[in-house]
Amino acid sequence: MIIVFKFIKKYAFIIIIILAAASLGIFKFLKRKPKDQTGNGNDVLDNIGVATSDYSFYNDKALNIAHNLGTAYAWYDPRSYTENDKVVFDLVKDMSRQQFDIVAKLYHDVYAKGKSLSSDLAKLLDDEYYKLLIIK
């Protein structure tokens, strides 16, 4: 035990530098930039067989729905605590069933990380807007 304390006392400065470097490396690893969501969305749309000209339409719809429902953010992010029901209703009400299915696939695979659009609409959208939706 005394040998360990002598070692720590002798090499304390080097141990502190190693711990600081390891902490900085861990911090940089945790704060790295996320992957390009639009690129991932384009890959999903390409696998579905959507025309390239429609990529931005579907990506914008799915991203805006996830953003306004608050599901695009982690649980500790204050933006996930509230929903903008009117905007979500306006985004979803004019979609056809085929468009809704494609947006739901993007929502699940890219923007909301495994959450179902239909269940999130039922759970997070106010009743007054949810009752008016034709596609659920």
Image (cartoon, rainbow, N blue to C red):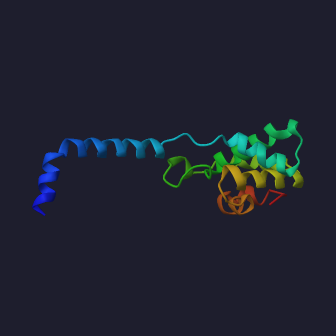
Residue drawn at (83%, 55%), measured in percent from left and top?
A: 101
Report the front residue among 119 and 110. Answer: 110
Residue drawn at (58%, 42%), measured in percent from left and top?
A: 34
Which quadrant of the view contains residue 113? bottom right
Locate residue 3 relative to residue 97 in the image: left or right.
Answer: left
Report the front residue among 105 and 75. Answer: 105
Which quadrant of the view contains residue 40? top right
Locate residue 75 relative to residue 60 in the image: left or right.
Answer: left
Q: Which quarter of the rendering shows the N terminus?
A: bottom left
Q: Position of residue 62 (x, y in %)?
A: 73, 47
Up-down relation of residue 50 to residue 117 (above or below): above
Q: Position of residue 66 (x, y in %)?
A: 67, 49
Report the front residue among 98 and 84. Answer: 98
Does residue 8 show up? yes
Which quadrant of the view contains residue 118? bottom right
Q: Position of residue 99 (x, y in %)?
A: 86, 50
